[in-house]
Amino acid sequence: MPSKGKIHDVFQNDIQQLTTQAGQQADMIRGKGTRPWNDPKWSDASKPKSPLDIPGITDGFNRDQIDTNYGQLIQSGSDAGTVGDVICVKTQGDYIAEMERGYRARHATPVRCIGHAMARRKGHSMTNGVFQGGVLKHVQDALKGGQS
């Protein structure tokens, strides 16, 4: 079966950028240059005006092509990609998403962090939230399942 997966440009470019930046960071500790930020590889046209340009950050981590490719791999049971294709493409998408979350967390303002934390806590306080609807329900179900 021919492979339907591929190595996507955003993944390859961002991995290359990380590799370059790691070398520069290692050189910096020995007094050669300054430490660069771990930024994605933006084109000049897509580079955000600042790290606080929330919508503008997305272009450096754009996973649209990866997501489309992944959808093609799992869309049809009779014309699916290989297991290797799925692993290859899913890993790329997940890695870019992790890089974006790290970048956004590093540049988040205290107000933004508090807003996100309070939204999570609001969800946690609900009866069908992670504590009562998740953990407690799981323990109750395990006890119930063990009694029958």
Image (cartoon, rainbow, N blue to C red):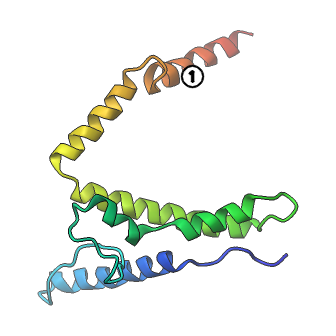
Q: Quick check: 135 above or below 83? A: above
Relative placement, left or right, of 82 versus 13 is right
* x and y percentages locating residue 142 in the rendered image: 62, 19
- Judged left or right of residue 8, residue 36 is left
Which residue sits furthest top? 147
- The quarter of the rendered structure image containing the C terminus is top right
Furthest residue toward bottom:
32
* Residue 30 location, quadrant: bottom left
The residue closer to the viewer here, 73 or 135, is 73
Can residue 129 be seen by looking at this rendering? Answer: yes
Q: Position of residue 78 (x, y in %)?
A: 88, 61
Under mark 1, the amino acid is His
Q: Report the side of 36 relative to 43 (left or right).
A: left
**Element type at marker 1?**
helix
Q: Residue furthest left?
A: 31
Q: Quadrant of residue 38?
A: bottom left
- x then y, percent, for residue 46: 34, 76
Residue at 14% across / 83% down in the picture? 34
**Is the residue 30 above or below the residue 118 in the image?**
below
Q: Residue 44 vs residue 143: left or right?
A: left
**In terms of image quadrants, where is residue 122?**
top left
Q: Pointer 1: what residue?
A: 138
Q: Residues within 10 Å of mark 1 (few under 14, many from 20)?
A: few
Can residue 87 be seen here? The reply is no
Report the residue at 51% width, 60% height from top.
94
